C-alpha cells in the first residue's frame, strides 16, 4: 500500500484569518491542486489520497461541493477523515454523504480500507458534547465512542497490520522539536490514554489538526501529523506499508508553484527536523 496523506486544507476559509501556522494560500489553491495532480501522475504508483480532516472551513453544501470538485480532479481516489471544521452543522454527516459520498466508501464517516494486507481504519473524531457536531465556542476535547473503539480492536484475518486515521493527534509536538518546555497543541481530555488501549495491531496512527509535522514512536507504534496542505510550503506525506517495510516521507510543492510564497522562519519548527519529517523501518510481518 502506498498513499498520500494530507490535511487541513480549510477550503472556503480566509488566507488572513483563522488558525494557521504558516502563510495560507487558498487564493492559489487551484494551482496547488494542479501540482499535486501532476505529482501523482508522475509517480504512477499512488493508490489513493487520504485527507486527515478539516477539508473545509465551515460545513455548508456549497463548500462541500467545491471541495468535492477540487479532489475529484485527482487521478486516484480520495478519502476523508472528518475534522472539527467539517462538522460545524448539526447535520454535517448527512450533508457530506449527500454532496460528497465518494469520500466515504462504505457510506459512513467511519470506514475501513483493505489493500495488500494492510487495514486502514478511518474514524470520525468527535469534538464536543454532541457527536459529529462541533461548535467553535466549545472547548476542543476529542473523543471516540465505544462502538468506534470496538471497530479498532478488530483486525481482518487477511491483514498483517493496521493503520488508523483520525483528525485529532494522540500527542502534542515534543518540546525538543519546538524549543518550549511543554508539548505543543496536545489533545485535551483523555483521548491519548483511551486510544492507547486499542493499538495492539497498529503500526501507525495518523492525525492532523495542529497544522504541524510530527513523527514519534511509542511502544512499537509510530504517530505522525501533517502540516496544513494549503499553507507554505504545501506539504504532504507519502506513506508506504509492505510486509517488509513501513516508511513515511514529507514532500513539499513550493518549488512547483508559479508564485513565491511567504515563509515564516520563526515557525520553522512546523516543518520539523529530518526525524520529524520521515522515517523508514524494515519489518518482517507475517
Image (cartoon, rainbow, N blue to C red):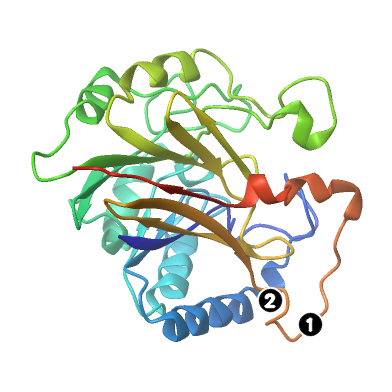
- Let me know if residue 234 appears in the view: yes
Q: In this figure, which residue is indicated by the disc labeled 2?
A: 28
Residue 75 appears at what percent x and percent y?
A: 36, 80
Q: Residue at x 43, y 71 (%)?
A: 71
**Mark nearer the viewer, 1 or 2:** 1
Q: Residues within 10 Å of mark 2 (few under 14, many from 20)?
A: few
Residue 12, label in figure: none
Residue 40 appears at what percent x and percent y?
A: 45, 78
Label 1 sits on a secondary structure element that is: loop
Q: Residue at x 59, y 55 (%)?
A: 10
Comparing 156 with 90, the one in front is 156
- Quadrant that contains the N terminus: bottom left
Residue 223 against residue 93 in the figure, above or below: above
Q: In this figure, which residue is indicated by the disc labeled 1?
A: 259
Q: Distance from label 1 to label 2 (Cα)? A: 9 Å
Residue 123 against residue 192 in the figure, above or below: below
Residue 89 appears at what percent x and percent y?
A: 45, 41
- Quadrant that contains the C terminus: top left
Comparing 164 with 218, the one in front is 218
Residue 227 appears at what percent x and percent y?
A: 64, 51
Comparing 244 with 236, the one in front is 244
As drawn, is 40 to the left or to the right of 135? Answer: left
Q: How many marks?
A: 2
As drawn, is 284 to the left or to the right of 158? Answer: right
- Let me know if residue 20 appears in the view: no
Q: Residue at x 65, y 45 (%)?
A: 276
Of the numbered discs 1 and 2, the one sitting upstream in the chain is: 2
Q: Residues within 10 Å of mark 1 (few under 14, many from 20)?
A: few
Farthest residue in the right direction?
266
Label 2 sits on a secondary structure element that is: helix
Q: Quadrant of residue 28?
A: bottom right
Is the Cβ of the residue at disc 1 closer than 8 Å to that at disc 2?
Answer: yes
Amino acid at each position: 500500500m502506498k498513499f498520500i496523506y494530507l490535511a487541513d486544507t480549510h477550503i472556503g476559509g480566509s488566507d488572513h484569518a483563522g488558525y494557521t501556522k504558516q502563510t495560507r494560500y487558498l487564493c492559489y489553491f487551484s494551482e496547488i491542486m494542479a501540482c499535486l495532480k501532476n505529482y501523482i501522475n508522475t509517480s504512477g504508483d499512488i493508490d489513493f489520497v487520504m485527507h486527515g480532516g478539516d477539508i473545509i472551513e465551515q460545513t455548508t453544501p456549497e463548500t462541500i461541493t467545491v471541495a468535492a470538485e477540487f479532489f475529484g480532479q485527482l487521478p486516484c481516489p480520495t478519502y476523508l477523515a472528518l475534522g472539527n471544521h467539517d462538522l460545524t452543522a448539526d447535520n454535517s454527516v448527512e450533508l457530506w454523504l449527500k454532496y460528497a459520498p465518494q469520500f466515504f466508501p462504505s457510506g459512513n464517516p467511519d470506514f475501513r480500507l483493505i489493500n495488500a494486507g494492510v487495514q486502514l481504519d478511518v474514524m470520525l473524531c468527535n469534538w464536543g458534547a454532541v457527536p459529529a457536531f462541533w461548535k467553535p465556542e466549545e472547548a476542543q476535547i476529542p473523543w471516540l465512542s465505544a462502538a468506534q473503539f470496538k471497530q479498532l480492536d478488530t483486525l481482518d484475518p487477511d491483514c498483517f497490520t493496521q493503520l488508523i486515521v483520525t483528525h485529532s493527534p494522540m500527542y502534542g509536538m515534543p518540546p525538543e522539536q519546538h524549543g518550549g518546555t511543554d508539548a505543543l497543541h496536545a489533545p485535551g481530555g483523555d483521548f491519548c490514554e483511551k486510544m492507547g488501549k486499542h493499538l495492539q495491531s497498529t503500526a501507525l496512527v495518523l492525525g492532523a489538526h495542529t497544522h504541524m509535522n510530527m513523527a514519534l514512536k511509542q511502544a512499537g507504534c509510530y504517530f505522525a501529523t501533517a502540516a496544513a496542505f494549503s499553507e507554505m510550503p504545501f506539504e504532504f506525506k507519502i506513506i508506504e506499508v509492505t510486509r517488509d517495510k513501513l516508511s513515511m516521507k514529507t514532500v513539499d510543492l513550493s518549488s512547483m508553484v508559479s508564485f513565491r510564497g511567504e515563509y515564516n522562519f520563526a515557525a520553522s519548527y512546523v516543518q520539523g527536523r529530518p526525524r520529524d519529517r520521515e522515517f523508514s523501518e524494515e519489518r518482517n510481518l507475517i
